[in-house]
Amino acid sequence: AQKITQTQPGMFVQEKEAVTLDCTYDTSDQSYGLFWYKQPSSGEMIFLIYQGSYDEQNATEGRYSLNFQKARKSANLVISASQLGDSAMYFCAMTLHGSTLGRLYFGRGTQLTVWP
Amino acid sequence: GAGVSQSPSNKVTEKGKDVELRCDPISGHTALYWYRQRLGQGLEFLIYFQGNSAPDKSGLPSDRFSAERTGESVSTLTIQRTQQEDSAVYLCASSSYPGQGMGEQYFGPGTRLTVT
């Protein structure tokens, strides 16, 4: 069974500092994708960043980067220069490139709070 | 262009009643997903539609849950004889190219269902 683990229920960071949100995954598939989504208090799910299992470079999108360590099966999200608007729930998710096409397996999330 | 829309945004119903939730995907998106998010939890996959193929219903929690989609348009999720444990936010997502590469899913704002 596929599984996503986010061990940090809550994280706190000061504005302008960097923060790392942890994510580990478990799958026997060789081809898969990893996502991070942001969910503000308004409830919408906002796509942040994607990493394919065969991508050799770590994905980056503006202030977001994904620290992909395939051997450790970890896909940590790094947010640089945190902003107050980054306060939200963050979900790590995985999709398998073969079976139920596109279905996302989600972790339980990390609540990030950015303080001034 | 318009994103994924869902209606109603909020629904309060009495235990035992049936409810119907609606999702309008992004035009041209062939894949449509339903997820459930209980309070403080990650998203649970419910059902997946891809074009005219048979839907993947493997995530539906019981036979009280059903969903339909006509072609590549609107989908409805029906919950019969609602129970209090059905209280959750029901999120719909659509995607243009699932299964390979990124296949980013775009989420709707969700329907918050409360069963009293």
Image (cartoon, rainbow, N blue to C red):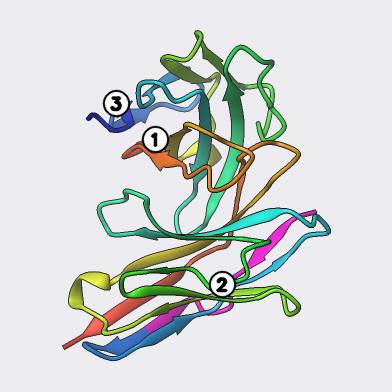
**Could you say which quadrant of the image residue B25 lies in?**
top left
Q: Chain of mark 2?
A: A
Residue ID at (53%, 34%):
B97
Residue ID at (53%, 27%):
B31
Work out how far the residue at label 3 is from the one at label 2, CA to CA, in angstroms.
42 Å
Q: Nearer the viewer, mark 3 or mark 2?
A: 2
Residue A13, horizontal then vertical, whole percent: 31, 88
Q: Amino acid at mark 3?
A: Pro
- The residue range painted magenta reads A1-11
Q: Amino acid at mark 2?
A: Gln
Residue at disc 2, secondary structure: loop
Residue at disc 3, secondary structure: loop
Residue on which the image places disc 1? B113
Residue on which the image places disc 2? A57
Q: Quadrant of the C terminus of chain A?
A: bottom left
The extreme front residue here reads: A56
Residue on which the image places disc 3? B8
Above or below, comparing residue A97 to residue B61 in the picture: below
Q: Quadrant of the N terminus of chain A?
A: bottom right
Q: Is residue A29 magenta?
A: no
Q: Amino acid at mark 1?
A: Leu
Residue ID at (40%, 83%):
A11
Q: Nearer the viewer, mark 3 or mark 1?
A: 3
Badge 3 and badge 2 in a common chain:
no
Residue A111, horizontal then vertical, whole percent: 40, 72
